[in-house]
Image: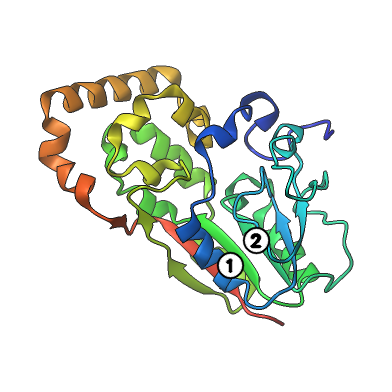
Amino acid sequence: MTATIAGDFDYETHGAGYTNTRQPDPRIAAHVHAALGDARTVLNVGAGAGSYEPTDRYVAAVEPSAAMRSQRPRALAPAIDAVAGHLPFDDDRFDAAMAIITVHQWPDPDAGLRELRRVSRGPVVVLTMDAVALGSYWLADYVPELFAAERRRFPAVAHLAEVLGGASVRNVPVPADCVDGFGEAFYGRPERFLDPAVRAAQSGWAFVDPEATGRGLERLRADLASGAWDARHGALRDQPEFAGSLRLITAPAR
């Protein structure tokens, strides 16, 4: 077990039950797997409980949190206890490498990305959030402190693409019934934010003062009860997908 916290969020303390609300969404997975191309060997860094790992290829996973490694399904290979900045693999070891909604938690994202580029002779695929776009999400009206924290955590997408070299950036739409419970997954299901289990699986809430969280959620609860939320945002309940902050960065093969 890693002796110290490897990223900015303590999954050893707060990671239990993560997979109850965070499952890979097959429509988002299709974007990730397409970006991997015809790679037969894939390295997944910051692999967590294994979300979005393809099951039709050889996958090696790296995850420093024992709590997250323990939640990997038995069908997936066990994850190696290591960190992004120091990958225990030779140069060009894999056909492709991937990092899914994790780079914002790395102590040195640039070093981690360079390591992914070093060990992959093929594409490097990173799924992340555009912090600028994230700030326009309606939840920011209720808990602005959450989005201030996320802006500090998420590296600029253009910078990540530059570090990887020649990378393309695509917007990935979020489906209305998304089963991966990150924040924008509930763009049309605002009541879900009132569930502590949902918030517990979204690391950003850990960086917000509990009093600010309480105030914001009480306002949301009141607006849902009065109909004020639906008056402003109710059309989102019937919107089939949401073009929010989710971005897929793909660096081509070297």
Q: Amino acid at mark 2?
A: Pro
Tell me if mark 1 has few (under 14), some (14-19) or many (20+) residues whose alpha carbon lies within 10 angstroms of its own: some
Can the viewer see residue 218? yes
Q: Position of residue 89 (x, y in %)?
A: 87, 62
- The reply, left or right, for residue 34 in relation to residue 228 is right
Tell me if mark 2 has few (under 14), some (14-19) or many (20+) residues whose alpha carbon lies within 10 angstroms of its own: some
Please say which color scheme the image uses.
rainbow
Label 2 element class: loop
As measured in the structure, the alpha-carbon distance from the residue carrying label 1 to the one carrying label 2 is: 7 Å
Tell me what residue is drawn at x 38 percent, y 60 percent: 173
Q: Quadrant of the C terminus?
A: bottom right
The vertical placement of 86 against 217, above or below, is below
The residue tagged 2 is 54
Q: Position of residue 81 (x, y in %)?
A: 82, 43
The residue tagged 1 is 33
- The reply, left or right, for residue 137 in relation to residue 106 is left
Tell me what residue is drawn at x 69 percent, y 42 percent: 73
Between 25 and 142, the one lying in front of the other is 25
Can the viewer see residue 156? no
Residue at the bottom extreme, as displayed:
254
Q: Quadrant of the N terminus?
A: top right
Label 1 element class: helix
Tell me what residue is drawn at x 40 percent, y 24 percent: 195
Q: Position of residue 38 (x, y in %)?
A: 67, 78
Picture quadrant of residue 226:
top left
Q: Position of residue 112 (x, y in %)?
A: 72, 57
